Image (cartoon, grey):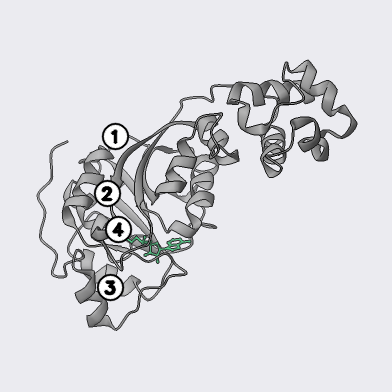
Amino acid sequence: MAASKFRVPVLNPCDPRALLREHGIHPSRALGQNFLADPNTARRIVRLADVGPGTRVLEIGPGLGALTVALAEAGATVHALELDRHLIPILKAVVSGIPNVTVEQGDALTWDFAALRDEPLRDKSLRDKSWVCVSNLPYNVATPVVARLLEEAPQMTRMLLMVQREVGERLVAPPGSRIYGAVSVKVAYHATSRIVGAVPPTVFVPRPKVDSALVLLERRPAPSVDVPSYDALFRLVGAGFAQRRKMLRRALVPVLADRTEAVLIAAGVAPTERAEALDLESWASLARAAS
Ligand code: SAM
């Protein structure tokens, strides 16, 4: 997509050391604060997210604004949601003079994603009502935030997320692998997913001890399986993976009680299977047989 005209901000978010020093701020480990210090990586993320003029973007955890500025530079309208109130004035100063960025203090674990639907369009040329989430997620809460985006933000049609490499691999894991888990099934239910890039620790301040991955999730127009109850499906999935080493005839007893073996057989799933062997369609068969 074409880049828009853009004024260079007074503060440089890709120099986080200087910003932190100037404001006397120590990055918080508890809040997963590793700030991007490389404009090329920020632009690469924007490119991979396919963001351009007319794209409405939710950015979770904008920090000092490295990605926010790159998103705005590409012409996107950005709503930036940051938990740390100490960073808000710095972020506001970084994006001051950029018309298409709003900054809000809030917690992505509890924030009402439905609010995005009603947000008035500042730019009347925006045609598409959908949103894209582009975020360098705080690593410690990345998985629950992804689950919330999938479940509670149906208007979020695309998500380009930077997460810890292991978390990214789990999100996109196919059945049969050691890292396939309940969240992999949830992702497969709502979206197609793939890892689209790797990011080394060297581009962050401070440097994290882990590698990062860029994950692209594209929401399906409709789930690829039909189940009588979404909650019942994920109660089964949760129980199966809570005791992933056990055979399903044991692991699913907390949910199916004395019907466990019969439900497994009715669904065409061997009672001796383990959760990690089941693809989404098999979980859906189980949910249908259990209903
Ligand atoms: N996007 C910035 C960048 O790339 O330089 C910062 C990314 S840093 C990995 C994660 C950011 O998420 C931090 O600014 C942190 O304060 C913020 N954060 C942590 N927990 C959050 C939450 N629950 N909701 C919103 N933001 C959160």
* Cα–Cα gap, marks 1 and 4: 38 Å
Residue named by callout 1: 127
Q: Visible in this render: residue 122?
A: no
Residue named by callout 3: 90
Query: Crowding at label 2, few (<14), some or many (≥20) Cα neighbours within 10 Å?
Result: many
Residue named by callout 4: 201
* Left or right: 234 in relation to 250: left
User: Label 1 amino acid?
Assistant: Arg
User: Label 2 amino acid?
Assistant: Thr
**Marks 1 and 2: in contact by CB < 8 Å?**
no
* Cα–Cα gap, marks 4 and 3: 24 Å
Of the two numbered discs 4 and 2 in the rendering, the one whose residue sits closer to the viewer:
4
Q: Nearer the viewer, residue 13 or 102?
A: 13
* Left or right: 36 in relation to 130: left
User: Label 4 amino acid?
Assistant: Pro
**Marks 2 and 4: in contact by CB < 8 Å?**
no
Percent across and percent down for residue 13 are 21, 65
